[in-house]
């Protein structure tokens, strides 16, 4: 039986939601200047592999972008 907790979140405007089931309980936190300016605080990340789904009215090219 899989006991990992499912987490839900959304962008600030609410147009896109995300549901993720982390691979482990470990969370990575970055306190660099860029992450703190971008998000108003430290950036938290968790490894989820393929266990991530997006939902909402604007799911697709209109609302989702990849920045690297």
Image (spheres, rainbow, N blue to C red):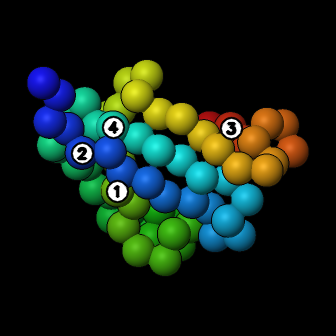
Label annotation for residue 23: none
Mark 1, Cα crowd under 10 Å, few <14 / some 14-19 / many 20+, is few
Mark 3, Cα crowd under 10 Å, few <14 / some 14-19 / many 20+, is few
Distance from label 2 to label 3 (Cα)? 26 Å
Badge nearest the viewer, 1 or 4: 4
- Tag 1–tag 4 contact (CB < 8 Å): no
The residue shown at (87%, 45%) is: 62
Instruction: Determine which residue is flagged by label 4.
Output: 21
Label annotation for residue 5: 2
Q: Earlier in the sequence, mark 3 or mark 1?
A: 1
Q: Secondary structure at mark 1?
A: strand
| Placement of 23 over or under 56, stated as above or below | above
The residue shown at (28%, 56%) is: 29
Distance from label 2 to label 4 (Cα)? 6 Å
Residue 16, image x, y percentages:
67, 53
In the rendered structure, the answer to whether residue 41 lies left or right of residue 27 reads right
Q: From the image, which quarter does the N terminus lie in? A: top left
Residue 14, image x, y percentages:
67, 65
Q: Earlier in the sequence, mark 2 or mark 4?
A: 2
The residue shown at (41%, 74%) is: 41
Distance from label 3 to label 1 (Cα)? 17 Å
């Amino acid at each position: 039986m899989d006991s990992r907790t499912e987490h839900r979140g959304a962008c600030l405007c609410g147009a896109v939601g995300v549901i993720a089931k982390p691979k482990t309980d470990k969370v990575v936190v970055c306190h660099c200047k860029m992450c703190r300016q971008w998000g108003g605080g430290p950036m938290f990340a968790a490894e989820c592999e393929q266990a991530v789904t997006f939902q909402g009215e604007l799911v697709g090219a209109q609302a989702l972008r990849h920045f690297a």
